[in-house]
Image (spheres, grey):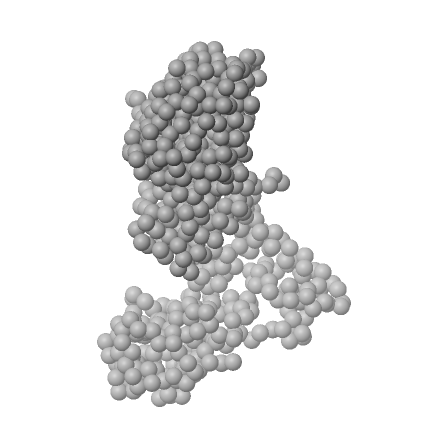
Amino acid sequence: MSVNLNCKLSDRFLDSKQSSSQRQLAIALSANASLDGNNTLLNLCLVLDHSGSMVGQPLDNVKRAARDLVDQMTQQDRLTVIGFNHKASVVVENQPVDRTESIKEKIQSLKASGGTCIDDGIKLGLQETSKGKDGTVSQVFVLTDGENEHGNNDRCFQFSRLATEYNMTLHSLGFGDSWNQDVLERIADAGGGSMAYIASPEMASAEFQKLLKRVQSVNLTNAHLILQLFPYVRLAELKPIAQVSPDTIELNYQTEGNAIIVRIGDLMTDIDRVILFNLYINPSTFISAYPGKSDIPILSVQVRYDIPSLAQVNLLSEPEDVSLQLIQNFVPQVNADVQNHLLALAKYRQTQLAEQKLQQGDRAGAVTMLQSASKTALQMGDYNASTILQDNATRLQTGTTLSEAERKKTRIASKTILQSPKES
Amino acid sequence: MKNVVMITCPSCAHANPDGAVNCEACFTALPIVSTIQCPSCQADVRSDAKFCGHCGFNLSNILGDDLGKTEDEGLGILSEAVSNNLPSEVITSQTESVAVPSIHTTSSAMSNTLPNEISSDDSGIVINPISEFPTIPKFTDIEKILAAEGNEPSLNTPINNIFEPELDNEASNEKAAPMNASINSSTIARTQLQQFAASLLHIQTNLNIEIPAHLAVVHIGKPNTVIPPDIDVSGFPDSDIVSRIHADIRTEGGSFYFEDTGSSNGTYINNLPLSAGNRHKLRAGDRISLGKGDKVSFVFQLNT
């Protein structure tokens, strides 16, 4: 089992006459499954909201969706179910999925009542899940339908970060329209997972299945990208690193010496995770040192990762060098793939700025930003997202406010690609 | 001759460092202003321009024809772009310019010229630099055909008229180069902007001055080193009350606006003072007086 690493530059040529040039590097990462016979085991934890607002159809659908998940898992996989309202309790203790009927019965026993305290649910989920984390891929699904009125959001984010330290991944699912998209997004981003939106109760099962499919394809965990930059290369000052596919997440980084380390988390076998780096290159020192050379190396990439099924940790991939070609008469030759990644990030950032402006009361500014985001989506061929964003801009322009459901849809439209461009 | 000027992001106002292509904050593509020299009038024009904003010279077409020629550095950069097959705009302009001569030969060879072929010729402002290359076959034939069809717009008038009044020589010296160039281009290019043409009738001498149709902003005043006037009034009697930088006429969406650019003696429109910073939308028949006492006055006229 190894890592598939694919580096692409926004433009592989560099103007030798320009003192400072900006380039984006897109690194696509996935797990190479072909060499591996035994399947990676899943250690799944469901943290389910059963507060009073879930009464009736919502909770029934969530319980059914959870029971369906049980059927999809193998007997060696492990499952934990935590129920929470304003307090959290263990519904199904961490155990192998071999007695499915008793597990399903326990899930079915959940009753809707009480308030919402997400952090207690996450905390108990992490504690219980950690019992089975050796040799497995640990994943936590947190489902909620409301504001965290009995809890503390900052505590949620701390637990999310803690989860990544324990090498567990936290995914968040928002149910209905009254949850807080900022909180759930931050939980998922900090926890290295994804955020899903269950707009209506019937969609619960589909979203659970989608997420399960994703976590079942996780083969490598705790992946870190390690970049060694050459002295004439630097990262952009503002938010230089972000994941752009499958969804958009701003990533933090650490520096050790002149190495830049970014935690990526899980690597899937079927889906690439694409990380975009924003770099500046000042080639003058290189040119004066090696006047005749046309190849200018800018950095080397390494991946550090764990293989849970073989209980191996901190494996290092072969370093891969990335270089640019210096030319005299520079003409931009933009890489179309990287350009699309750029647009994905632009769409996300523009929508975020629009929301910030809206919160500051700058309605006109928000409209303009949403319109640019919509245009960006159009450029990527993501017509669905473009329509949603443009509709929002129009709504704001006519003086109406956005409904909660629309704001969630907007967030998802900005974060993911709703419609991939047709291959032509 | 390629200078890159970085600016703050037009979308989110984040200040980006030198060399940025996409804004660091919102990743909007930043407008990079790089300029080249117009091969005709040597003015600095943006490298993505299709026509020179000063003389109207067709930049895209000359590149298509001059593909091999790279003695001019500015040209070199752009023709490089063409040969490298990259920026889409340049590619289209290249194919455009290649396509045009073929249209010429067919339309001149065919006896029954179809109307849409004429119109495709007509719309091709691209003709103009070709005329400088006599190798292109039978250009004069098309000219005759066009003339015969009555499609030739006689738009060589507006700027010529400015030169007819007895403007003093040192005034015209400064603008002579670009003006001459623009006359050339407009006679050849047949820019069809005539519906917007307007003129100022000088009341004291009954002299009609066309407002140059190809300029978005027409400066009115007297010769100076800062903003050379497009309409020079220094030859008119009592012009001493007119400031060197007196007023502008702006063309926007087919309308003309008059604004005082900080003259010493003010501007009066229909005998009412036009305060500095205010724009007046001109209507036919408006009386414009530069300075006090109604001594240098014009009537705004639309030529339809």
Residue at (47, 55) in percent of width and height: B49
Horizontal relation, residue A199 to residue A185: left or right: right
> Is B13 left, or right, of A199 in this rendering?
left
Q: Would residue A257 be visible to someone looking at this image? A: yes
Which of the 4 image quadrants contains residue A364? Answer: bottom left
Instruction: Decide if residue B119 is on the left or right side of residue A165.
Output: right
Q: Residue A65, percent across and down?
A: 52, 31
x and y, in percent, of residue A29 in the image: 48, 26
A408 is higher (above) or lower (below) than A364:
above
Q: What residue do we see at 53% from left, 51% from top?
A: B89
Seen from the viewer's position, the closer of residues A70 and A340 is: A70
Q: Nearer the viewer, residue A323 or A85?
A: A85
Q: Quadrant of residue B97?
A: bottom right
The reply to whether residue B48 is in sight is no
- Residue at position x 71%, y 63% in the image: B107
Where is residue A318? Give x, y as percent: 45, 17
| On screen, residue A249 above or below A374 | above
